[in-house]
Image (cartoon, rainbow, N blue to C red):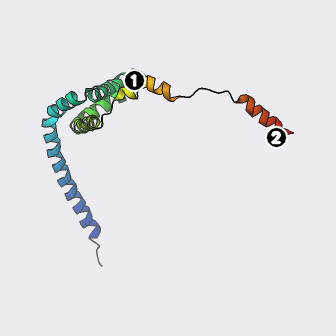
Amino acid sequence: MRINLSGIVGLIVIIILSIIAFSIMKYVYIFLLFALPITLAITFFVKRSLLIGYFKGLWFRITQRGLSGVLGTVISLFFLPFRALLLMGQAFLFKKIGFNEDEFSPNGDGGQNKQQSEFTEFEDLSNEFKVLDNKENT
């Protein structure tokens, strides 16, 4: 009788690779945790609206969703070192391309004037459709 060991060997390899990956990620997390104040400070000085918006979103989750919001916020704060690194990259990208939220928000002066200039005048076409419907029925 022959025993097939390929499945067992594959499972052992996957377990060993998972242990190695988690140990590497543990050290990356610890490094980013120590770099967290630096990344948050850089993000704050480059584009503070990103950081303020992130923490406002966390507070909104807590106030609007109850227990699930609290649990989501705890999980988000656990992964904050990774998110802070992404926010810092986003801040540098927005600074490089010159992105400004005021141009796209209807509450900002620049965005509202820009949106109003893009819209066209309303034309009532309901009478033309009635005329076409009457011609088709005859």
User: Which residue has dot 2 on it?
Assistant: 136
* Left or right, 103 with reference to 132: left
For the C terminus, the quadrant is top right
Residue 61 in picture, x, y percent from top left: 35, 27
Q: CA–CA distance between discs 1 and 2?
A: 47 Å
Q: Residue furthest right?
A: 138
For the N terminus, the quadrant is bottom left
State the residue in front, 15 or 79.
79
Q: Residue furthest bottom?
A: 1
Q: In the image, is residue 4 above or below residue 127?
A: below
Residue 118 in picture, x, y percent from top left: 50, 29
User: Which residue has dot 1 on it?
Assistant: 110
- Foreground disc of the pair 1, 2: 1
Q: Quadrant of residue 103?
A: top left
The answer to whether residue 108 of the structure is visible from this angle is no
* Left or right, 126 with reference to 106: right
State the residue in front, 57 or 18.
57
Q: Quadrant of residue 82?
A: top left
Q: In the image, is residue 2 above or below residue 10?
A: below
Q: Three-letter amino acid code at disc 2? A: Glu
Residue located at (14% from left, 45% from top): 27
Q: How many marks?
A: 2
Q: Secondary structure at mark 2?
A: helix
Residue 88 in picture, x, y percent from top left: 23, 36
Residue 117 in picture, x, y percent from top left: 49, 26
Q: For the residue carrying disc 1, how many other residues have a C-alpha within 10 Å: few (<14), some (14-19), or many (20+)?
A: some
